């Protein structure tokens, strides 16, 4: 059996949630992403992704002690922000979420403006959903990334759903997202 055939067979088993032959398997992933590689990946995304076209640059530095600095050069914002990575927690639906808090770099009046813009955007989506067939409101109800005036929250379950990988949600345990020694540490386990 070729490696491609084996990969396809395992992928089909995961998608069908048929773990016969691999029941009890456990895979641990510890991925320390160096600052340079992280910035290269982001640069590639900005260059080649329509979703990132409003960014001129997005650069991470000083990844230590669960903090980092991000320099954002975007069509609407040009800032350097110091952030704190909180431990992965669960929301009210028991879905894993990661919160990144803004420590420095956003002024008080910018937080107020950001909060107002976010409130307006959510209200507008709700208003539009009431006058549509309801599909758009349902589609936008679960946002994988929520930005507030003080933090960014990433819902891993929604992120996987949006990528068509929702069958992985019951299998993945998100252990840790952290920063140390100029690395972003991603630590997770997959259990079948």
Image (tube, rainbow, N blue to C red):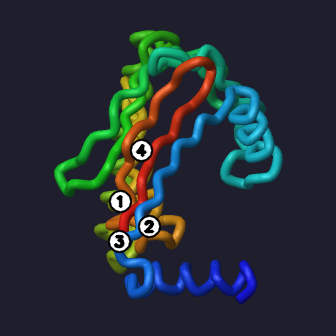
Q: Nearer the viewer, mark 3 or mark 2?
A: 3
Q: How far apart are the alpha carbons under marks 3 and 1?
A: 31 Å
Q: Secondary structure at mark 1?
A: loop
Report the front residue among 156 and 117: 156
Q: How far apart are the alpha carbons under marks 3 and 4?
A: 29 Å
CB under 8 Å between discs 2 and 1: yes
Which residue is painted at 36% across and 77% down in the image? Answer: 23
In the picture, which quadrant includes the C terminus?
bottom left
In the picture, which quadrant includes the N terminus?
bottom right
Of the image marks 1 and 4, the number of the one nearer the N terminus: 1
Above or below residue 48? Residue 148 is: above
Which residue, given by chain and number where applicable, does mark 4 sit on? 154
Q: Locate residue 129, reporting x and y percent.
A: 34, 67
Q: Alpha-carbon neighbours of circle 3 within 10 Å: few (<14), some, or many (≥20)?
A: few
Q: Which mark is residue 24?
A: 3
Q: Is residue 189 left or right of residue 185?
A: left
Q: Where, by quadrant of the figure, is residue 57 drawn?
A: top right
Q: Nearer the viewer, mark 3 or mark 1?
A: 3
Of the image marks 3 and 2, the number of the one nearer the N terminus: 3
Q: Where, by quadrant of the figure, is residue 101 drawn?
A: top left
Q: How far apart are the alpha carbons under marks 1 and 4?
A: 11 Å
Which residue, given by chain and number where applicable, does mark 2 sit on? 161
Which residue is painted at 55% across and 80% down in the image? Answer: 10
């Amino acid at each position: 059996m070729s490696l491609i055939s084996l990969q396809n067979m395992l992928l089909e088993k995961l998608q069908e949630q048929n773990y016969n032959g691999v029941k009890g398997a456990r895979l641990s992933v510890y991925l320390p992403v160096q600052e340079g590689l992280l910035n290269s990946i982001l640069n590639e995304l900005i260059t080649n992704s329509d979703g990132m076209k409003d960014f001129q640059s997005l650069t991470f530095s000083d990844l230590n002690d669960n903090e980092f600095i991000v320099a954002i050069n975007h069509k609407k914002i040009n800032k350097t922000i110091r952030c704190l990575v909180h431990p992965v927690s669960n929301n009210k639906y028991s879905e894993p979420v990661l919160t990144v808090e803004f420590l420095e770099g956003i002024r008080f009046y910018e937080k107020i403006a950001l909060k107002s813009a976010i409130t307006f955007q959510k209200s507008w989506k709700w208003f539009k959903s009431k006058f549509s067939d309801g599909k758009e409101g349902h589609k936008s109800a679960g946002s994988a990334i929520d930005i507030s005036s003080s933090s960014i929250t990433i819902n891993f379950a929604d992120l996987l759903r949006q990528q068509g990988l929702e069958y992985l949600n019951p299998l993945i345990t998100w252990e840790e997202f952290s920063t140390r020694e100029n690395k972003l540490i991603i630590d997770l386990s997959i259990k079948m």
